[in-house]
Image (spheres, rainbow, N blue to C red):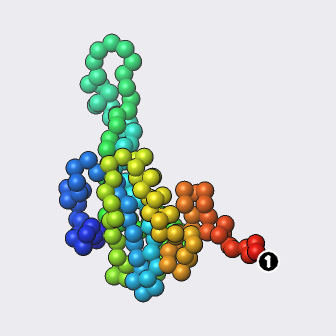
Amino acid sequence: MWLYQNKEVPSIDDMPQGTIGFIYKITHLPTGRAYIGRKILQHSLKKKLTKKELAEQTGPGRKPTTKRVVKESDWKTYYGSSKPFLALVKDSAKEDFTREILRYVSSKKLLTYYETKELFVNEVLEHPDAFYNDNIASKFFRKDFIEKDLDT
């Protein structure tokens, strides 16, 4: 179950109007290490029209063969995209984790911005003992932070 300000969030209807996604933090309670990420709530898919729908089309011009369908994402059961973290989830009990929504977001651009902001503010790459995240925006990687003493 997802929590927002210590309250359970069982459905999209329990989120503010206009929410397209959220920034989250999942904590592995036995170790205290966390994973920060973002999740979009709905996907827009192209779906082929059925034979009946194609036959019902009238009017001049070329007829569309597909339609746009909005589908709810897997946000209720989501535990992140990090393979090492997902392996930990698979090998652990669900009670070993807390899933917290940090912020609701109203656009895809802001979803990227706020996720990146949280990752930098929490210094996830600099604290491998506290976070499972190993990169930010596929541009900044934990391995880049192996300190080299330049003063000697």
Residue 125 appears anywhere in the view: yes
Percent of width and height locating residue 132: 51, 73
Residue sitting at x 36%, y 46%: 107
Residue 86 appears anywhere in the view: no
Nearest the eye: 34 or 84: 34
Disc 1 packing (10 Å; few <14; some 14–19; many ≥20): few
Number of labels in the image equals: 1
Q: From what the image shows, is residue 19 above or below residue 49?
A: below
Farthest-out residue, bottom: 30
| Quadrant of the image occupied by residue 62 | top left
Nearest the eye: 32 or 54: 32
| Quadrant of the image occupied by residue 68 | top left
**In this figure, which residue is indicated by the disc labeled 1?**
152
Nearest the eye: 85 or 119: 119
Residue sitting at x 37%, y 26%: 64
Farthest-out residue, right: 152
Percent of width and height locating residue 113: 44, 52
Q: From what the image shows, is residue 33 above or below residue 80?
A: below
Left or right of 22 in this view: 113? right
Q: Quick one: SS at disc 1?
A: loop
Left or right of 67 in this view: 122? right
Image quarter hosting the N terminus: bottom left
Percent of width and height locating residue 93: 38, 82
Residue sitting at x 23%, y 65%: 10
